[in-house]
Amino acid sequence: MSTSTDVKWVADLRELIALRQNDPQWVTDMRQHHMDLLADLAWPERQKTPLRGRHLDLIPLGFPTSPSSVPQSLLDTVKSPAYIAFANGELQELAFLDDAARQGVIVAPLASAVTEQRQLVEPLLGHIMDEPANRAEALNAAMWDSGAFIHIPADVKVLSPILILHYADSTRARRFVPRTLILAGPNSRVTVIERYVSSAGDEKLLFTGGVEILAEEGAHIHYGSLQNLSPNTEVFIRRQAEVHHDANVDWSIGEFGGGLTVATDKTRLVEPGAHSTNTMVFFGSRSQRQDFDTRIIHAAPHTNSNIVAKGVMTDRARSSFTGVTDIRPGAIQSDGRQKEQTLMLSDAARADAVPSLLINENDVYAAHSASTGPIDKVALFYLMARGLSEAAATRLFVHGFLAPVIEAIPLEILRNSVWESVEGKLAE
Amino acid sequence: MASKPTMVNEEYQYGFNDGDVSVLKFAQGLRRETVEEISRIKKEPKWMLDFRLHSLDVFYKKPMQHWGADLSQLDFEKIVYYVRPSENQGRTWEDVPKAIKDTFERLGIPEAEKKFLAGVSAQYESEVVYHSIHKDLQDKGIIFTDTDSALREYPELFREYFGTVVPPEDNKFAALNSAVWSGGSFVYIPKGVSCDIPLQAYFRINSENMGQFERTLIIAEDNSFGHYVEGCTAPSYNSESLHSAVVEILVKEGARMRYTTVQNWASNVYNLVTKRAVAYKNATMEWVDGNIGSKATMKYPSVYLMGEGARGSVLSIAVAGHNQHQDTGAKMVHMAPNTTSTIVSKSISQHGGKTTYRGLVHFDKSAIGAKSNVKCDTLLMDNESVNDTVPYTEVETSHAEMEHEATVTKVSEEQLFYLTARGLTEEEATRLIILGFIEPFTRELPMEFAVEMNRLIKFEMEGAIG
């Protein structure tokens, strides 16, 4: 499998790892281990999204990333009591409520937490996620730089959301490798929102991100993610959570940017009473390729899940959504649901969906529904007859289509950002 | 609840066998000579021999599919590719050899014919041994014969359509069938003719390790109507048998065709079937497909909606018991404006059996105004049984609408309670709920088949409550 380009490529990356002098030995070993895997792993294989022809191996990942800073206007959107901002892989700003710190809440760059919070981080990092199965995942495990470690101790309820902003300036970087780890102790509450933004450029930028979440007994985590990367960014993102006894992980995912997006979302409900909802909004325009694989695994009795995905496709964009509700033997009295809806705004666009149920237990309820269709011509006619232009009527219709999921996002700041992203897409 | 209602996998009801009555039986294995010999015995024209040999090459080249049912136990070298049960094709019922006749008697074919069926074409192993067709249908110009006879008697008509809907390159098993096909039905319904009574064929595998590769070709000319009914029963054997059929149907402008299958293969049969129809302008194609039994079934009846206003529907049930995997579904490929399709799938898994719904709805760019509705429901009878629902949708236009719904549940305890509170035993109540669950399917069967279907379901369930 490995070719001479691969050898050069891997050697360059190994050098970069060697330069990371602040890494403790256990992290260096972990990076090296994944670097060893890298050359033998292929890029992700997705049935509907062939990656051949995107020449991912030609992106010079070894290109040294030079420092940059987050544009002020962007920084203003995340300013809240607790936030952490990264630019080109390095920490730029960290703001943190004093009383949160007093309660033992930790919000820190992962790169320093691996040393300062080793006893918490080491048992978790890379262990909630599956072992990397492809080149993008191995790259993240070997090369991650920006990203946060968040720990909420038992019984602590963090009221204001914690925001994480990642920014890459694509004139100064070819790789964008964030990694976030969230540990919510028993009966804790937290909302975390992560945003990814890159500046547009002529050169390709490779993004490979990872998010790991552990929800201990009775914890409630709401995790929101909004991706507005530039069209020259090739995006691979993997998010994985493990949900324990009576705990709850709610995902709100907005996928808007990137030239190519390959997303993998996996939630494991490992103990009775675990609960997860996964709400996703995607909007594909121009020649975007988006491939989503969202799965929830019921590995314990009395577990509940719901996947809701709404997509809007326009121009020549293509999307593929695979949803999997996997109920394992013994997961009695579980309830797994899925709903997928796609709105087609253009004849050159394409949307594929595979909403699957894998059911190995009979004392359960599992259901899914999926639909795809155009804008309702009657509704459009009605709006235009009342003086709206076709563009304005379409915009209103898209709003109506997405409102049930976006308005369900409990956090105003994220809700507004998602609406802005939708507006941005409609204005393209 | 103390005991769970489960359905018991009865010993196969038609699992008698007649001893080996065949006149000619090939050695096991598939070689070029096997194919040449089949073609020589059948005295086929050269083009058919060439077609078979080309298909054999395709079969050799195609890899085994890695998805769907587990076919790792299937050994192509252990299959007998041709068996001819008697020298001559039976002209009348009296000519049919007694042992074969006995088998049919037990399956109830003569009665079926006496009642209301238009023609009975019963396939026993590889050749059609008994065949008849009602006189007035013949007068209307309807052709209903076995596929081998059709090749001899209607060579031009045959050659025009054969292999056009399912080419050998389609998949490995279509290639295998194209290389060694034998028997099957040929139906031709002329323009404007309505065949009001169902055309019926029974198929039966008898010899051990015998593959059955029937090939059916149905042509419904403009504005015609026909209903073809196929029932399958096979005796039980211990080592694997292979059934790999190809069914090709052309439904021309304004015509309507319905193809009904009630299948009950023994639990050692691999049933790997390619069924496909093309529907032209304003034509309607309906598949009604019941899958009970077999070791593994992979079957996805499909309709290619090629002309404006064409309609397709698949209504299917699948029942999987111990060690059985029913990997079934449907494909609707919308290639023209205002085409519509409906898929209704009902699955029951019991005793560790596995059912998979695997379907595709595809809207091409030209499918403006097309609509599709898919509904899949599954009952899991016990906690060892498994169901996967994997519906693929591909949408390439913004002018089409697709809706899909699926549920997986167990027998409702509320319904059970209601029925048992009214004096039914748990077994009776469970049976009633299951018959209700599959009722949308049985409702569409010819009356006689509906009775048979309900009987089969009851056999499957008897003594279920422990």
Image: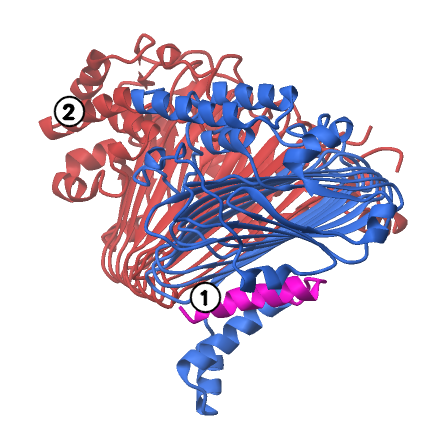
In the rendered image of this protein, does residue A1 appear above or below residue A284? Answer: above
Image marks 2 and 1: residues in contact by CB distance under 8 Å: no
User: Which chain contains the residue that carries disc 1?
Assistant: A
Residue at the image point whose x is 43% and y is 34% from the top: A45
Direction from residue B191 to residue A350 in the image, left or right: right
Q: Which residue is mark 1?
A: A425
Direction from residue B433 to residue B359 in the image, left or right: left
Q: Would residue B196 be seen by someone viewing this image from the given angle?
A: no
Q: Which chain is blue?
A: A
In the rendered image of this protein, does residue B10 appear above or below residue B257? Answer: above
In the rendered image of this protein, does residue B306 appear above or below residue B124? Answer: below
Q: Would residue B118 be seen by someone viewing this image from the given angle?
A: yes
Hey, which residue is sitting farthest left in the picture? B46
Q: Which residue is mark 2?
A: B49
Which secondary structure, mark 1?
helix
Residue at the image point whose x is 41% and y is 67% from the top: A345
Which amino acid is tagged 1? Lys
Magenta-highlighted residues: A407-428
Counting other residues with Cα less than 10 Å from the Cα at mark 2, is it few (<14), some (14-19), or many (20 or more)? Answer: some
In the rendered image of this protein, does residue B10 appear above or below residue B157? Answer: above
Q: Is residue B381 part of the magenta span, yes or no? A: no
User: Which chain contains the residue that carries disc 2?
Assistant: B
Residue A400 in percent (x, y) is at 57, 73
Q: Nearer the viewer, residue B113 or B175?
A: B175
Q: Colour of chain B?
A: red
Q: Quadrant of the C terminus of chain B?
A: top right
